[in-house]
Image: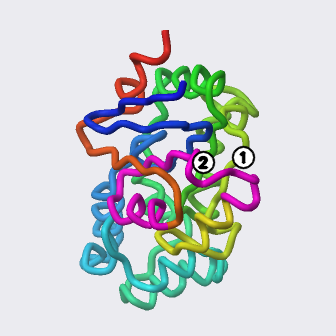
Amino acid sequence: MNRLVLGNKEFFDIKNIVFDLGGIVINIDYYATIEGFKKIGFVNFNEIYSQMRQAHVFDNYDKGLILPSEFRNELRNMSGATFTDVEFDSAWNAMILDLPLKRVETLKKLSKYFKNFLLSNTNEIHLEYFFNYVNSVFGHGVFESLFEKPYYSCRMGMRKPDLEIYHKVINDSRLTASETLFIDDTAFNVDAAIEAGMQGYYLNKQEDIVELFKNYLV
């Protein structure tokens, strides 16, 4: 596929596609986690966490610089509440919803034409929960088979939109940046990918990769 038209944008010479995870591949709801923490006593959680901005403790945890136990304890101290680890994890994971079968099928079909990669700002508590979910629904190894290689911020010591994480993916998988399309639902992450030499597409909340690629996957 020498020419791709996605939304109102044209892309040329794409050989690789790097997908964000949350909001692109899986459905997420940040407000579910905000409400979850309110219910266990962290009433102003929304002041330190959202899709667009977050306190440094979240950045450090996304980068794997602190352990899950340290992350929980830092938020306990910030909240003044005394929630258990189970209550914490339930609230923290509430944002993770489902992975629609149609998206799995779309990614399988895309892998016939492109090398698919995953680049996600995430953390070990979320990954454990997510893989328990996808393995129970789709079977062990099915999700991993959709991608050449997944890249998770918490296992890389860096996160989007830092330029170093895009360069790491490009260099580690020996990609040509200009032949690589990055798709994310956060505009400044897409802008950073473009600055790193990739082509980029911002997926708005009304779009879905199933519809986005339907004209190319017959």
Q: Residues within 10 Å of mark 2 (few under 14, many from 20)?
A: many
Residue 211, quarter of picture? top left
Name the kind of residue labelled 1 in the image.
Answer: Lys
Q: Which residues are magenta?
A: 170-195
**In this view of the protein, which residue sits in the foreground, 84 or 42?**
42
Q: Residues within 10 Å of mark 1 (few under 14, many from 20)?
A: some
Quadrant holding the N terminus: top right
Where residue 19 sits: x, y (%)? 52, 45
Mark 1: which secondary structure? strand
At horizontal 55% and vertical 62% (from top left) the residue drawn is: 122
Identify residue for label 1.
Answer: 149
Q: Is residue 179 magenta?
A: yes
At horizontal 31% and vertical 39% (from top left) the residue drawn is: 9
Q: How many marks?
A: 2
The answer to whether the residue labelled 2 contacts the one labelled 1, judged by CB atoms less than 8 Å apart, is: yes
Mark 2: which secondary structure? strand
